[in-house]
Amino acid sequence: MNQYDLNLILNPNLSAEQVQIEKDYIETALKNVGAEVSNLDDLGNRRLAYQVGKDREGYYLMYTIKAGGNPEKDIASSLRLRDHVRRVLVVKDRPEWKTKKA
């Protein structure tokens, strides 16, 4: 199984309940493609580098997942269909990209 980073930006105007509904949907979608969640970093609302639609902020979720095969397109296409998802980025994690501490 390969390790991937899944970065999502959600609508910044979501309530805590709506964010939890989106998280549950994301985890279900990941299980449907055979991926398992290793870690979730919930960064909350942050300012965007550029405007997306009418929003200058976004609700950031960063998942570390393990999946076999090549799940990038399956994951991204299923998550982009959600109304509250603004951006989806799936990147294969590589050990050589990690910074080494001296």
Image: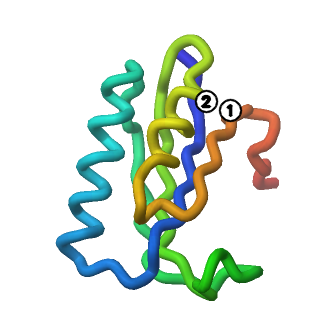
Q: Quadrant of the C terminus?
A: bottom right
Q: Earlier in the sequence, mark 1 or mark 2?
A: 2
Please tell me in which quadrant of the rendered image residue 15 appears: bottom left
Amino acid bearing label 1: Lys
Give the secondary structure at mark 2.
Answer: helix
Quadrant of residue 73 within the rendered picture: top right
Left or right, 77 with respect to 101, comes to left
Quick check: 93 above or below 85?
A: above
74 lies above or below 10: above
Contact? badges 1 and 2 (CB < 8 Å): yes
The circle drawn on residue 68 is: none
Q: Write the residue at 66% across / 75% down.
A: 52
Q: How is the image coloured?
A: rainbow
Mark nearer the viewer, 1 or 2? 2
- Residue 87 lies, in percent from the top left, at 60, 59
Would residue 62 appear left or right of 98 to someone viewing this image? Answer: left
Residue nearer the viewer, 93 or 84: 84
Q: How many badges with numbers are in the image?
A: 2
Residue annotated with mark 2: 72
Q: Which of the pair 52/43 is nearer the observer?
A: 52
Q: Secondary structure at mark 1?
A: strand
> How many neighbours does mark 1 have within 10 angstroms: few (below 14), some (14-19), or many (20 or more)?
some
Residue shown at 55%/64% (left/top)?
A: 86
Q: Disc 1 and disc 2: Cα gap in Å?
A: 8 Å
Q: Position of residue 99 (x, y in %)?
A: 78, 50
Measuring from the top left, give residue 33's x and y in whole percent. 41, 22
Disc 2 marks a residue whose amino acid type is Glu
In the image, is residue 17 above or below residue 56? above
| Residue depicted at 45% across the width and 74% down the height | 11
Task: Residue at 53% x, 77% y: name it.
Answer: 58
Outermost left residue: 17
| Residue named by callout 1 | 92
